[in-house]
Image (cartoon, grey):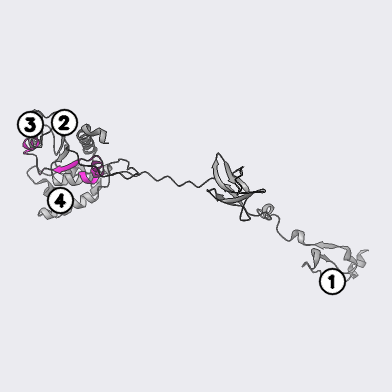
Amino acid sequence: MDDSQLESQDLAPVNLEPSGPGRVQTRPGPAASIVWRMDRYRDDVLRPGWQRAHLKITRDVPVEKDLVVEFDDFCGAVVGWENGIVVLEDRKGRKRSFPFGPGFLLEGEPVAIRPPLRAAAPKPRYTASGSRISETSEPAREALPSRIYVEGRHDAELVEKVWGDDLRHVGVVVEYLGGIDDLPTIVAEFRPGPGRRLGVLVDHLVAGSKESRIAKQVARAGYRDHVFVTGHEFIDIWQAIKPERIGRKAWPQVPRDQDFKKGTLKALGLPHADQADIARAWQAMLARVRTWRDLEPQLNQRMELLIDFVTQDHLDLG
């Protein structure tokens, strides 16, 4: 056929939509021998995943006891698994082992048997003092005869907030004295001895202070093995809180002839007229203490020494 014949040929439009069995279209006229097979290219063969489009999706199923599955011609319930192998037992008591993975049928559906899901390990929890909390519940500890005394109410509240959980765990009770002027008499009335130790936390325990002289009196009374008096250099327990926790770089310097707490509140621009103002301010400070990290290292060290000392005769109870 020459070009003139092609030009005169009636080229009817070609219907590109497949029809009938075999999805074959022919072009009418003399060119009818041209066969159009559209179904081979009906889908985009370049799209991702086309090679697996005809495969059935196999879902993962965690193995568990009594799960009934099929593998090849064997149907049975899961009775155990170990080292990547699952053991099935049929209703006649016959057992066969198969590897974890695909190839199983669950109610006719292709599945892959996988190892059991492991629960995420619980994150460790810690007390405010940094001790790890046991995941198992423990019975309440009976209070030990040994005690820890602290100088004031605010000292006791701070110790309770940070070390309270630890002290309850070992059965140590903390009491506050309201001052240490009568400490030698208080110690004598306590009657220290083996299994009955006394630890005392004192504010402003520095050389030449009233507190250091009282501590020496107790030491001379002959209780060295059963009484431990220690303390920190701060004028008041307030200063054992890191100043950053109250938004300051340092605690205010209060003249010695002024009441420390009222002078501190005055320097901070807070109400300081009476005891109610002091109590409100202290509670606000205490609320900002979360853990031992919010306290000065000196207080942390002294408290750990006291706890170790008063529990030394009771280590078998830990």
Q: Nearer the viewer, mark 2 or mark 3?
A: 2
Helix, strand or loop at label 3? It is helix
What amino acid does circle 1 point to?
Ala
Where in the figure is residue 315, as x and y percent of width and height?
25, 33
Measure the C-alpha gap from mark 2 to mark 3. 21 Å
**Where does label 3 land, which residue?**
217
Measure the C-alpha gap from mark 4 to mark 1. 101 Å
Where in the figure is residue 184, as x and y percent of width and height?
7, 35
Q: Quadrant of residue 135?
A: top left
Which badge, 2 or 3, comes first in the chain's sequence?
2
On residue 12, the disc is 1
Image: magenta residue range: 159-187
**Where does label 2 land, which residue?**
194
Q: Nearer the viewer, mark 3 or mark 4?
A: 3
Disc 2 crowd, CA 10 A, few/some/many (<14, 14-19, 20+): few
What amino acid does circle 2 point to?
Pro
Which badge, 4 or 1, comes first in the chain's sequence?
1
